[in-house]
Amino acid sequence: MYPIIWLGVVIVFVATELATTQLTTIWFAGGALVAFALSFFDGINIWVQLVVFVLVSVILLIFTRPALIRLVEKNKVKTNVETVPGKIALVSEQIDNLQSKGAVDIAGITWTARAQQDDEIIAVGEKVVVLRVEGVKVIVKKV
């Protein structure tokens, strides 16, 4: 009876991982798979199977998840927005937070811009560095 239960647990964890793709439940599927294999041996009771399930799952989670996350992130292509922070831009319209005005050119694209400090006014032609993107605006400071 226990092999059927462990097989069900494996299926539930794999299905959950496929639905979420967060790389968390797959490790518990690995632990359940080991417990499934142990359930075929007569001398190994359910408590031993449960302990092995927990231990294998935690070991897999702690030691293999970080490496796999790094591998997945390494191959991830950044979107345009993710590449903007840290870039140098040229002010194309005076930046004045109090008047809600300002624009910068970054690699040929015009972005609405705000200064990091509300009381700061940055003139046309000044170079700024993009600190972050907030919605459709970039937050900048003078270089």
Image: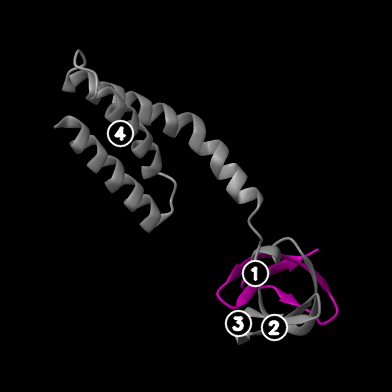
Magenta-highlighted residues: 116-143
* Residue at the spot 24% in from the left edge and 24% down from the top edge: 40
Query: In the image, what residue type sits under mark 2?
Result: Gly
Residues under numbered marks 1 and 3 in contact, where contact means CB atoms less than 8 Å apart: no
Measured along the vertical axis of the image, is residue 51 above or below residue 130?
above
The alpha-carbon separation of the residues under discs 2 and 1 comes to 18 Å
Mark 4, residue position: 32
* Residue at the spot 59% in from the left edge and 49% down from the top edge: 72
The alpha-carbon separation of the residues under discs 1 and 4 comes to 41 Å
The numbered disc on residue 98 is 3
Query: In the image, what residue type sits under mark 4?
Result: Ala
Q: Is residue 9 left or right of residue 94?
A: left
Mark 2, residue position: 102
Residues under numbered marks 3 and 2 in contact, where contact means CB atoms less than 8 Å apart: no
Name the image quarter holding the N terminus: top left
The alpha-carbon separation of the residues under discs 3 and 2 comes to 10 Å
Q: Nearer the viewer, residue 57 or 139?
A: 57
| SS type, badge 1 | helix
Dividing the picture into quarters, in which one does residue 103 lie?
Answer: bottom right
Q: Is residue 71 left or right of residue 45?
A: right
**Would residue 116 be seen by someone viewing this image from the given angle?**
no
* Residue at the spot 43% in from the left edge and 34% down from the top edge: 61
